[in-house]
Amino acid sequence: MADNERKRGAQDRALIALSESYEVAYWSKKFKVTPAKLKAAVKKVGHSARKVEAHFKEQRHMAADRARIAISEPYEVRYWSKKFKVTPARLKAAVAEVGHSSKKVEAHFAAKKKTAKKKTAKKAAKKTVKRKKS
């Protein structure tokens, strides 16, 4: 869209002018976002329509994929390992066992922790019984 509506050159079509209300309305509708989100995206990545579109695609992809653990990506393995306080090997084993859902993996580790606490409590109880007998 052009600042002068009569001039519609290719150069101007590739840029988003936030100072023009009709451009903000057009691009907001085109990207299916609010004007505030459009302005924030332009501030973050620049006035290029191509870059803004790529930014929104990335945001949508991240939102849809946020609850899944991608073992093939090293940065994801580091993130989820740190979040669950486990080694990458244990994380990979848990994903293989229960699937890629972060909620299922979290529940898996919580269940393992619970059983580990019960075992340590039983061992401690046995030690105190042995001490009393001696």
Image (cartoon, grey):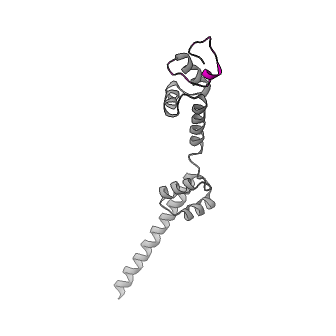
The one of 50 and 106 positioned closer to us in this rendering: 50
Seen in the picture, residue 16 relative to 76 is either above or below; the reply is above
The one of 91 and 129 positioned closer to us in this rendering: 91
Magenta residues, start to end: 4-19
Is residue 34 inside the magenta stretch? no
The residue under the point 64% across, 18% down is 9
Seen in the picture, residue 16 relative to 85 is either above or below; the reply is above
Q: Quadrant of residue 125?
A: bottom left
Q: Main secondary structure of the magenta part?
A: loop
Q: Quadrant of residue 74?
A: bottom right
Seen in the picture, residue 70 relative to 28 is either above or below; the reply is below
Is residue 10 inside the magenta stretch? yes
Specify the quadrant that holds the N terminus. Answer: top right
Specify the quadrant that holds the C terminus. Answer: bottom left
Relative image position of residue 3 (x, y in whole percent): 56, 15
The one of 101 and 121 positioned closer to us in this rendering: 101
The residue under the point 49% across, 19% down is 19
Q: Quadrant of residue 54?
A: top right
